[in-house]
Every structure is written in structure tokens, then in C-alpha cells.
Image (cartoon, rainbow, N blue to C red):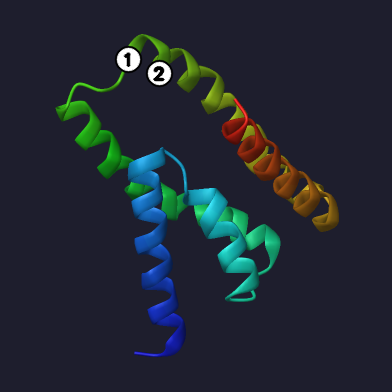
Amino acid sequence: MDKNKYKLIGLGLVAGLLNGVFGSGGGTIIVPSLVFLLKLKDYKAHATAIPIILPLTIISVLVYVFNNKIPFSHAFSVIIGGLVGSYLGAKFLNRIPVNYLRKFFGSLIIYTALRMIWR
């Protein structure tokens, strides 16, 4: 097995742990890792993160459903908007210049982190 395969498995382990614990980790960990560790182009890294996140999320959802932790009335409302937003985001990703994409994505992560720390 080559070095990249080990990096990818390790990345999956970290992303899966973060997804299970925090309900996040897919995009916030996978995208920068694919770009900086594996030298994948930004657009491909963002697009590749989606099919990686899906099985991680399915496993986490099953665990949370079986432990009665999901308020479905809230979840379904967000899912409706999320479906439309996901479609639009996927259609427009390639139209966003990479430098803006990186700045917006990085700023969003920093803003979210600061809100979580000082809230």
C-alpha cells in the first residue's frame, strides 16, 4: 500500500471520529486535507468531500436514531432548505474563483470556531 493510501485511511478515521462526535468533520477536515496533503484541486476536493461525508453521516445518523437523539421536527425543516441549497451549491461551485472559495471557506471555519469558543 502506498503512502497516500495510508494518509487517506487516516484522514477517513479522523473525519469519521469528528463527524460522530461533533456532527461535522467531513468538509472541515477532508477538504483542506485533500488540497494540502494530497494536492487535489480545490473544486475537486470540495466535490470529493461530499461522497466521503455521505457514508460517515449515515453511520452517525443510525447511531443517533437508535439512541433517540434526533429531534426530527427540526431536522426535517432544515433538510428541506438543505436540499435546495446543496443543489444550488453544486451547480455554482465551478463559477466561484478558487481564491474566493478558499477565503470564504476558511473564514467560515474561523468564524464558526470563534463563535463556539466564545459563546
- Residue at x-position 33% and y-position 49%: 55
Q: Amino acid at mark 1?
A: Pro
Kindly give the residue lying farthest to the front in the view shown: 118
Q: Which mark is on residue 75?
A: 2
Q: Is residue 60 above or below residue 76?
A: below
Label 1 vs label 2, nearer the camera = 1
- Residue at x-position 44% and y-position 52%: 51
The percent coordinates of residue 58 (x first, y second) are 30, 41
Residue that badge 1 annotates:
71
Place residue 70 in its image quadrant: top left
| Most foreground residue, 77 or 90 | 77
The quarter of the rendered structure image containing the N terminus is bottom left
User: Mark 1 touching mark 2, by CB under 8 A?
Assistant: yes
Q: Is residue 119 above or below residue 21?
A: above
Q: Amino acid at mark 2?
A: Ala
Place residue 33 in its image quadrant: bottom right
- Residue at x-position 81% and y-position 48%: 96
